[in-house]
């Protein structure tokens, strides 16, 4: 089967890092017979907005809807704003999440060799599952001006939204190796149930759904004290499930555990569509200099293959995903690192090195 992959290279470092991911995907499809990916480049983003006054053309939205999966680079630029002062990427990503119903924001946080986390000896392997269609972001593009000096955005929490994100997190925990400290499969519901009725409801629905998963341990945490515990004891966490805004903030915070944003991939996943992109922004300060770290984007592309493999029960894709993951780990373990991690490789050289590892690992597997 040929998989149609919609690709948005985006702005800033987006094009450079996406080119490394598509390079690695091409190496995998060539080295592992029976995989066919049709890469379809689409317009959209801040530069496109400057040229046209639109965030993306209609054909991009149609192609994204029709694609088997979407791969994105980073998007946006702090100096390019919509008339209401907001940045372009929020409109693109939030609209994509809403229109394609991408309700699960999946952010794996895992240490790679050479990554410089806060505590390099800490064992970090957790996933943040962020509800991505409601919560505080439900009022994105809306909100209310109550008076000249008072503005309001509303947090929306529904049973449907809370149920499906809880189920997603509990199912995910069943497929993982558990938390690093003792291997226990654990889902921690991170909320502020002691203050907000909406989040007390989120917790109640989580507990109801968790009753269907007796083999997965569950726990609750309040987002404020949890933030400290996450930094101090990351090895005690496996899967976290949380409201939209909390998930947004915790994802960037947790990236510090593994040495920065250049290493944090993400998937925005729904029942019928999914979009994969690095968790970081378009880093205009280093754009166009071949200096960015493409790991987050390459690993996002690997997550895309895993999602497609699961959805289509395609073992070749599963193998390709494993090969890419191993290639990233082995490349970094060999000391091939970009400047943000203290290495000397350019972004494109790192992409070449991972592609080369993919070819080597695939041929070893075939032998
Ligand atoms: P956004 O709000 O769009 O997510 P941001 O304000 O979080 O963006 P980023 O664009 O993610 O900011 O960049 C934050 C810092 O991290 C910048 O100094 C940038 O150079 C650095 N950075 C981000 N991504 C990478 C990367 N892939 N490789 C190297 N450095 C990066």
Image (cartoon, helix red, strand yellow):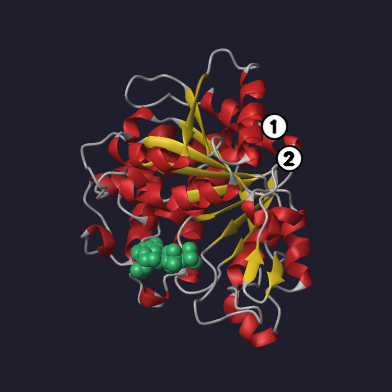
Please give the name of the residue rendered at 71% of the width and 39% of the height, measured from the top-left corner.
161
Numbered mark located on residue 163 in the image: 1
Q: Are marks 2 and 1 in contact (CB under 8 Å)?
A: no
Marker count (numbered): 2
Q: Is residue 142 left or right of residue 112?
A: right
Of 362 and 99, nearer the camera is 99
Residue located 37% across and 44% down the image: 327
Q: Which residue is mark 2?
A: 158
Residue 41, percent across and down?
63, 67
Q: Nearer the viewer, mark 2 or mark 1?
A: 2
Which part of the image, by quadrant, shows the C terminus? top left
**In the picture, residue 202 is in which quadrant?**
top right
Quarter of the image for the N terminus: give it: top right
Residue 224 x, y percent position in the rendering? 42, 43
- The one of 312 and 51 positioned closer to us in this rendering: 51
At x 24% / y 50%, what residue is drawn? 116
In this rendered view, identify the residue nearer to me: 272 or 127. Answer: 127
Q: Residue furthest bottom?
A: 51
Q: Residues within 10 Å of mark 2 (few under 14, many from 20)?
A: few
Q: Residue at x 54, y 13 (%)?
A: 215
The kind of secondary structure element at disc 2 is loop
* Disc 1 packing (10 Å; few <14; some 14–19; many ≥20): some
Asked if the beta carbon under badge 2 is closer than 8 A to the nearest atom of ligand 1, the reply is no
Q: Is residue 185 left or right of residue 145?
A: left
Instruction: Give left or right: position of 160 versus 351.
Output: right
| Mark 2 to mark 1 CA distance (whole Å) | 8 Å
Going from N to C along the chain, the mark reached first, 2 or 1, is 2
Point out the quarter of the image occupied by ligand 1: bottom left
Indicate the secondary structure of the residue bearing disc 1: helix
């Amino acid at each position: 089967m040929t998989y149609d992959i919609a690709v948005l290279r985006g702005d800033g470092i987006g094009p450079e890092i996406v080119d490394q991911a598509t390079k690695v995907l091409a190496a995998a499809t060539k080295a592992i017979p029976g995989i066919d990916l049709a890469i379809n480049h689409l317009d959209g983003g801040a530069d496109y907005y400057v040229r046209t006054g639109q965030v993306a053309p209609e054909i991009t939205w149609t192609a994204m809807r029709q694609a088997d999966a979407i791969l994105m680079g980073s998007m946006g630029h702090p100096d390019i704003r919509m008339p209401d002062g907001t940045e372009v990427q929020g409109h693109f990503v939030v609209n994509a999440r809403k229109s394609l119903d991408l309700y699960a924001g999946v952010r794996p946080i895992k240490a790679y060799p050479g990554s410089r986390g806060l505590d390099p000896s800490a064992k970090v392997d957790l996933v943040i599952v962020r509800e991505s269609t409601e919560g505080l972001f439900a009022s994105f593009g809306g909100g209310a001006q109550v008076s000249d000096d008072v503005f309001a955005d509303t947090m929306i929490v529904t049973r449907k939204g809370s149920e499906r994100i809880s189920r997603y997190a509990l199912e995910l925990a069943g497929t993982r190796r558990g938390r690093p400290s003792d291997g226990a499969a654990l889902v921690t519901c991170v909320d502020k149930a002691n203050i907000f009725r909406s989040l007390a409801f989120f917790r109640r629905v989580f507990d109801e759904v968790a009753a269907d998963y007796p083999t997965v341990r569950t726990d609750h945490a309040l987002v404020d004290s949890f933030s400290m515990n996450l930094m101090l004891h990351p090895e005690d966490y496996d899967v976290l499930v949380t409201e939209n805004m909390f998930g947004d903030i915790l994802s960037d915070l947790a990236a510090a555990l593994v040495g920065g944003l250049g290493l944090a991939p993400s998937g925005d996943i729904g029942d019928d569509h999914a979009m994969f992109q690095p968790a970081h922004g378009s880093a205009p300060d280093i754009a166009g200099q071949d200096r960015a770290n493409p790991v987050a984007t390459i690993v996002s592309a690997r997550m895309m293959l895993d999602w497609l493999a699961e959805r289509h029960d395609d073992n070749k894709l599963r193998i390709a995903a494993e090969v890419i993951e191993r290639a990233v780990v082995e490349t970094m373990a060999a000391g091939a690192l970009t400047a943000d991690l203290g290495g000397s490789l350019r972004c494109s050289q790192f992409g070449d090195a991972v592609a080369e590892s993919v070819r080597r690992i695939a041929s070893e597997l075939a032998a």
